[in-house]
Amino acid sequence: MRSILIPLAIISGFSLLIISSISRHLFWLQTAWIGIGIVFILISFFLDWRSILNYRWFIWGFYAASVVVLIFTYLTAPVIRNTRSWFVLGPLQFQPVELVKIALILVYASYFSKRHLAIARMKYILISFILFLIPACLTLLQPDLGSATVLFGIWIGFLLISGLPKKRILAGFLLLAVLGTLGWFFFLKGYQKARIIGVFNPERDTLGTNYSASQSKIAIGSAGLLGKGYGQGTQTQLGFLTEPATDFVFAALVEEWGVLAGLLLIGTFLFLLFKILNVGFARENFEKFLCSGATIVFGLQFLINVGTALAIVPVIGLPFPFLSYGGSSLLTNFFLLSIITSIAHRP
């Protein structure tokens, strides 16, 4: 238990440290979100989530409800940052796709734990694909390419850890190539294509498409070993670094606290993922798949967020788990981790 909570506390501390230097208002909001997340963790000491997750109707009902909320949000939500991704209730905003990520992990953990020995059968692969495809299409309509990418990663990740034969894996990569080609010509917006092209041509349009990536590289490259100091990051504090509390929070942290702090953060996060996997290894199939699914979703968002900061991944707007500012992602991440701590707390 402590092996999970200690790295979580370190990452949350880094989050509050860098966000406090960016915005006092966001700092207090982030403190509140983390406080609620801590409550989730405390509840896990008294609530055995396995007694609830053993009911299939709860898992499938959660999945269905999250998809319905996703549809409702798309039909009624206002346009925020060029997407219809946010459910707005007064001053509060919530991104339903964050719930979908948890729902998909729970559904897949239940589905694959009972079928992993027969997963090579095309019927089971097709059903798992449909479970991903429904929320993914709704997410792409918003449009939210980043979240759709995570949903796709969850599906692929579960297929791989379920022991899919090599022939099926090869067929899957061929299918991915076909879907990628179709997506490029029929689904991706012009600005999304420009961001992808910009990764391979970083010196092109540094005041336009590649502006954010360029400023991020400047922030990290000028940091040195120990950084410029609290509140002294020029790219961060002078507004050159876009979205320093969310998409480029890693670059903001490194600029002010140095490459050493960045490496410490990365090592701490990887240690957290390792411990989450360890919780599942000694458990039943459902719990193994659940912990593996959490590792997939946390790890994928981490890789994309840090890759974005280093300008080796297109900017698709994914948070660094437990570090980036944001109520939706932070609360759902804490909720998922509370389920895992509940499992770890009990034999």
Image (spheres, rainbow, N blue to C red):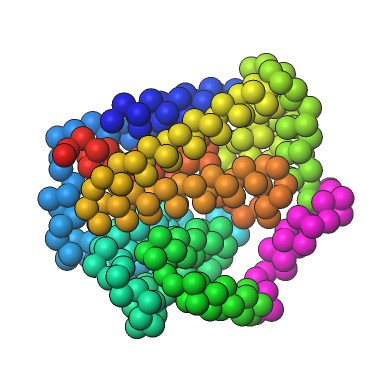
Please give the range of residues in magenta.
184-209
Can the viewer see residue 78?
Answer: no
State the image quarter where residue 189 is shown.
bottom right
- Residue lying at 32% horizontally and 56% vertically, measured from the top left: 289
Q: Give the x, y percent position of residue 35.
A: 34, 29
- Residue lying at 24% horizontally and 38% vertically, measured from the top left: 344
Q: Give the x, y percent position of residue 2.
A: 31, 26
Q: Give the x, y percent position of residue 215.
A: 77, 39
Q: How many marks?
A: 0
Quarter holding the C terminus is top left
Q: Residue furthest bottom?
A: 123
Q: Looking at the image, which is closer to me, 76 or 214? A: 214
- Residue lying at 76% horizontally and 55% vertically, measured from the top left: 199
Q: Is residue 229 above or below residue 301?
A: above
Q: Looking at the image, which is closer to me, 91 or 140? A: 140
Can the viewer see residue 128?
Answer: yes
Q: Is residue 202 above or below residue 132?
A: above
Quarter holding the N terminus is top left
Q: Looking at the image, which is closer to me, 256 or 78? A: 256
Residue 200 magenta-highlighted: yes
Q: Is residue 330 above or below residue 253?
A: below
- Residue lying at 53% horizontally and 78% vertically, measured from the top left: 171
User: In the displayed structure, does residue 223 sit left or right of residue 335?
Assistant: right
Residue 21 magenta-highlighted: no
Q: Give the x, y percent position of residue 82.
A: 60, 59
State the image quarter where residue 74 is shown.
bottom left
Q: Looking at the image, which is closer to me, 200 or 21? A: 200
